[in-house]
């Protein structure tokens, strides 16, 4: 890893989450996405950018419409706004990044060639490409917070189960082992941690249905049909205070379930579906050293900052 992540002197660490760029060929819609990212980065000046999947779109396009023919070039263009500003950035892959014409291994190779990425390939003996953990150091040089990144896959691996993939048991085992190791290195103290993945966990539906949430839900939660237990593992380990996903472009809500804040990003890309009156943007996240919570807000394409979102009560 080329870049050490550090809390600032004011003890803050700010993350921009971009999600679902769906970059295809650098055409007008992709350039609109780039302009949005540039405006957000210049306004917020984050310490880290996290792309939560579907950075590029390699899936089906309507005949006659442009498709992604150069996925490696598309990916480099998609992260260009962050790279040229020298901001450390991390990525997890989504279901559309490597749907056709390219493998996750090939795309990861292109990621790791970038100068400012803190992404890691992750262990090869567990499922997926890009399962890794990063720590953020405090002013004293000690680890003060942790970030976990998971490859949430593509489609169900089981023929008789339709729908999206789930985070597999080997990945959950890796997370538990990594969390234990970090606690052992920090006097058995669980560092406050955030987790990033593309496809929402089933608990995203549960939190909307059972708890007060803030934000919008304009489409179903397109989670895996199998609950593989990652959320339960996070509750048991006691380190993760917030999770962040994308995938569902017109959901942006957050809600607290069993002490963990489950958050959607705000879809960033124009080269894909959206909803009238639901502008593209980014989710911002701010950690404060020594605190087991975080602040979060949205910054929209027109520069609007949304710090308070509409409250949703279960059953409404």
Image: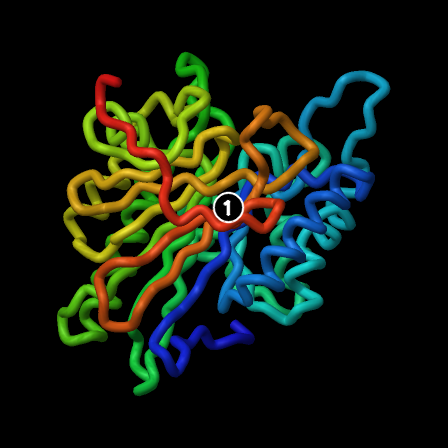
Compare residues 304 and 253 and report the one nearer the observer: 304
Residue at point 30%, 58% (across, down)? 294
Compare residues 242 and 54 and report the one nearer the observer: 242
Compare residues 139 and 90 and report the one nearer the observer: 139
Residue at point 80%, 43% (across, down)? 26
Hey, which quadrant is residue 286 in on the image? Answer: bottom left
Percent position (x, y) of residue 3? 52, 75
Query: In the image, 196: left or right of 51?
Result: left
Query: In the image, 288: left or right of 78?
Result: left
Percent position (x, y) of residue 288? 31, 68
Compare residues 156 and 24 and report the one nearer the observer: 24
Q: Is residue 307 visible?
A: yes
Hey, which quadrant is residue 278 in on the image? Answer: top right
Question: 63 above or below 306?
Answer: above
Query: Most extreme residue toward the bottom, as rendered?
Result: 140
Query: In the image, 209: left or right of 156?
Result: left
Percent position (x, y) of residue 253? 37, 35
Percent position (x, y) of residue 102? 69, 39
Mark 1, residues whose alpha carbon is within 10 Å: few (<14), some, or many (≥20)? many
Query: Most extreme residue toward the right, as rendered?
Result: 64
Q: Secondary structure at mark 1?
A: strand
Q: Quadrant of the C terminus?
A: top left
Dot 1 corresponds to which residue? 52
Residue at point 67%, 27% (across, down)? 59
Residue at point 34%, 76% (across, down)? 11
């Amino acid at each position: 890893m080329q870049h050490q992540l550090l809390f600032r002197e004011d003890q803050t660490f700010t993350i921009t989450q971009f999600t679902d760029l769906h970059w295809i060929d650098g055409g007008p819609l992709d350039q609109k996405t780039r302009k949005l990212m540039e405006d957000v980065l210049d306004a917020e000046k984050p310490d880290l950018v996290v792309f939560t999947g579907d950075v590029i779109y390699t899936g089906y396009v309507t005949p006659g419409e442009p498709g992604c023919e150069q996925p490696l070039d598309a990916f480099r263009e998609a992260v260009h706004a962050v790279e040229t500003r020298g901001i450390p950035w991390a990525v997890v892959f989504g279901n559309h990044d490597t749907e056709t014409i390219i493998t996750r291994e090939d795309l990861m190779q292109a990621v790791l060639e970038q100068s400012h990425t803190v992404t890691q390939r992750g262990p090869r003996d567990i499922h997926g490409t890009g399962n890794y953990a990063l720590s953020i150091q405090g002013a004293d040089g000690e680890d003060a917070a942790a970030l976990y990144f998971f490859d949430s896959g593509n489609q169900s691996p089981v023929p008789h189960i339709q729908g999206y993939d789930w985070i597999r048991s080997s990945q959950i085992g890796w997370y538990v082992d990594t969390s234990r190791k970090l606690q052992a290195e920090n006097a058995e103290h669980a560092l406050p941690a955030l987790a990033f993945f593309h496809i929402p966990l089933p608990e995203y539906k549960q939190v909307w249905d059972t708890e007060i949430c803030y934000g919008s839900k304009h489409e179903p939660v397109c989670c895996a049909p199998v609950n593989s237990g990652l959320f339960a593992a996070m509750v048991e380990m006691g380190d993760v205070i917030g999770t962040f996903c994308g995938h569902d472009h017109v959901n942006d809500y957050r809600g607290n379930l069993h002490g963990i804040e489950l958050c959607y990003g705000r879809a960033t890309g124009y080269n894909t579906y959206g909803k009238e009156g639901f502008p593209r943007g980014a989710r911002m996240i701010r950690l404060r050293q020594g605190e087991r919570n975080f602040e979060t807000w949205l910054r929209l394409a027109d520069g609007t900052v949304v710090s308070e979102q509409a409250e949703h009560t279960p059953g409404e």
